[in-house]
Amino acid sequence: MTVREQLLEMAEPRYREFISPLMPGEKHVIGIRIPQLRRIAREIARGEWRAYLDTAEGFYFEERLLQGLVIACAKCTPEEKLRHVARFVPKIDNWAVCDCFCWRLKAAEREPMWRFIRPYFRSGAEYDIRFAVVMALGNFADAEHIGQLLGLLGAVRHEGYYARMGVAWAVSVCFVKCPEITRRWLERDCPLDDWTFNRSLRKIAESYRVSDADKKALRRLKRAGKSRAERGGMAK
């Protein structure tokens, strides 16, 4: 049985109906829950996973996501893993593939990945940026990297909704992890455009790990201006 045949046998029509509207533009969804895909990825990673990646199909959403999950759990050197990541990133075409692919790094992977993702913040591709941002918020929102990370987030200029929402999410994580540094960054001529800045404040306010006093203080920073995307009627 091929991997595709295995996936098609696992299809849940009701689950497909539930998740498909959450991924605008994604038309080819089988309907498989993420824990099941992770289980299959671990099974593949225990075998000839390199051969799988060389021949893997990507017509369905789950097929692309499965490739990313295999890369994330494959046992190899950080250098080899990054070669596979570089080939996979162009296949990311929606937020779900991106966010489920990004994994918690092992110690040996951290510094190579930090060097690897930084150029992606300046990419002209929406999901290149989303990948860098989500990988960073899950691994580098810490005292060691916070200054550089905020600088990278502040320099993002892409108008894509999922790139900018990723930035807002990352800023909220930075505030939770390093509140004083992030607060000063938000208060002192923050370089984010108005839409992303205000969304960052909203994401912070949604966090249960931020005090009511901090939320109240940050609400005063909300900007009145609207971005070009908002004036054009971007979907929320």
Image (cartoon, rainbow, N blue to C red):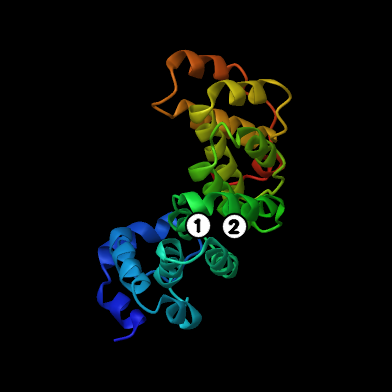
- Say what amino acid the circle numbered 2 marks: Tyr
Between 161 and 89, which is closer to the camera in this rendering?
Answer: 89
User: Mark 2 falls on what kind of element?
Assistant: helix
Q: Give the alpha-carbon distance from disc 2 to disc 1, as whole Å.
A: 7 Å
Between 117 and 127, which is closer to the camera in this rendering?
Answer: 117
Q: Which mark is residue 98?
A: 1
Query: In the rendered image, is residue 213 in sight?
Result: yes
Indicate the position of residue 106 as horizontal and vertical percent values.
45, 51
Q: Is residue 152 above or below residue 109?
A: above
Q: Is residue 200 above or below residue 106?
A: above
Between 124 and 31, which is closer to the camera in this rendering?
Answer: 124
* Residue at image coords 47%, 65%: 26
Q: Is residue 96 above or below residue 39?
A: above
Indicate the position of residue 70 as horizontal and vertical percent values.
41, 67
- Horizontal side of 12 relative to 120 (left or right) equals left
Q: Which mark is residue 127?
A: 2
Query: In the rendered image, is residue 56 in sight?
Result: no
Q: Residue 180: which quarter of the image? A: top right
State yes or no: discs 2 and 1 in contact (Cβ < 8 Å).
Answer: yes
- Say what amino acid the circle numbered 1 marks: Cys
Indicate the position of residue 217 as horizontal and vertical percent values.
55, 14
Dot placed on the residue nearer the N-terminal end, 2 or 1: 1
